[in-house]
Image: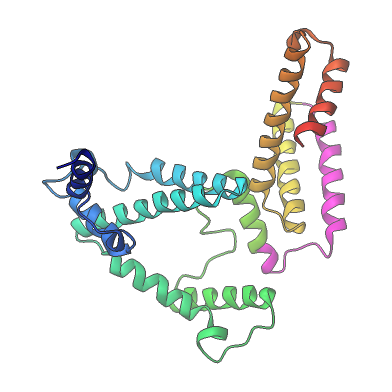
Amino acid sequence: MTPEDKTSQNEAQSQPFSDQELGTFQTLIDIVARLRSPAGCPWDLEQTHNSLKRNLLEECYEVIEAIDKGEPEVLSEELGDLIVQVAFHADIAKQAGEFQIEDVLRQINSKLVRRHPHVFADGHAEDAREVERNWEQIKEQERQANGQRQSPVEGIPNGLPALSYAQLMQERVGKAGFEWEDVSGVLDKIIEEVAEFRAAATPEEKLHELGDLLFSMVNLTRWSDVHAEDALRQANQRFGRRYLSMESLASERGQDFNSLPLAQKEELWQEAKRLVG
């Protein structure tokens, strides 16, 4: 047997699934079930819904980062990592006798069909905006049928980042009719909040007014069809790239960046903007 043959044999022995099997959702479910079996992996077996919360959140952010960077191969890998989290939670629930992956799929498939009557039934939707309105009406009908009437400001996950929470709440109350007539009202509100911050006399008042100002800024992103989280995340990334470029430019010129006067740092900042965007 040649070294190449031995390598192929070892790879075959270490890979219990065919390439076709590796491309199926059922294989993922089977792998997770085996990992969490008594003869499987001790770490995987001891995981719970609570212990995996941080992992789930991290995987979501890694998916978002791959989307922001426009890297399809990385996005494909990160989506796989995210799906693993779904499979793990479903297996934990199955072992606890709570529900199975089939229940998860049945519920989401039924929901998608039910909320798209313009596709799967005799409903009508002229454009995406009408789809959104119909979706909200169907959700409200479902809540009423289940005796779950609630205010638009209720039922928002507390774990959402503050910017996302604010934007979702504003979207909900806007659909309920509590909305500016046009974006000029939003801009005027921001100017008003800036003035109130300037007039704030105590740390508590400043905290209060800064919160109101941030809330109004989120409203502006919503009126601009932009997600506040995306806007700030991308701004953070731009600032980081530019700052690293500033430090690099100073170093190339034999300058101590930290000791440069602000005017020179501003010149480097403008140069970095031209170089890295």
Which residue appears at 21% of the width and 38% of the height?
Answer: 3
Expressed as whole percent of the image width and height from the top left, the position of residue 71 reads 57, 48
| Residue furthest bottom as drawn | 122
Expressed as whole percent of the image width and height from the top left, the position of residue 78 reads 45, 48
Q: Is residue 264 above or below residue 65?
A: above
Residue 266 as seen in the image, left or right of residue 118: right
Residue 172 versus residue 82: which sits nearer the camera?
82
Expressed as whole percent of the image width and height from the top left, the position of residue 44 reads 24, 43
Which residue appears at 39% of the width and 42% of the height?
Answer: 55
Q: Is residue 137 above or below residue 215?
A: below
Magenta stretch, main secondary structure, is helix
Q: Check the image and tell me how it is coloured.
A: rainbow
Instruction: Tell whether position 82 is magenta.
Output: no
Quadrant hosting residue 212:
top right
Residue 182 as seen in the image, left or right of residue 86: right
Quadrant occupied by the N terminus: top left
Q: Is residue 152 visible?
A: yes
Q: Is residue 152 above or below residue 50?
A: below
Residue 93 versus residue 249: which sits nearer the camera?
249
Quadrant occupied by the C terminus: top right
Quadrant hosting residue 186:
bottom right
Tell me how many marks there are.
Answer: 0
Which residue appears at 72% of the width and 69% of the height?
Answer: 177
Expressed as whole percent of the image width and height from the top left, the position of residue 4 reads 24, 42
Which residue appears at 73% of the width and 13% of the height?
Answer: 251
Q: Which residues are magenta?
A: 173-201
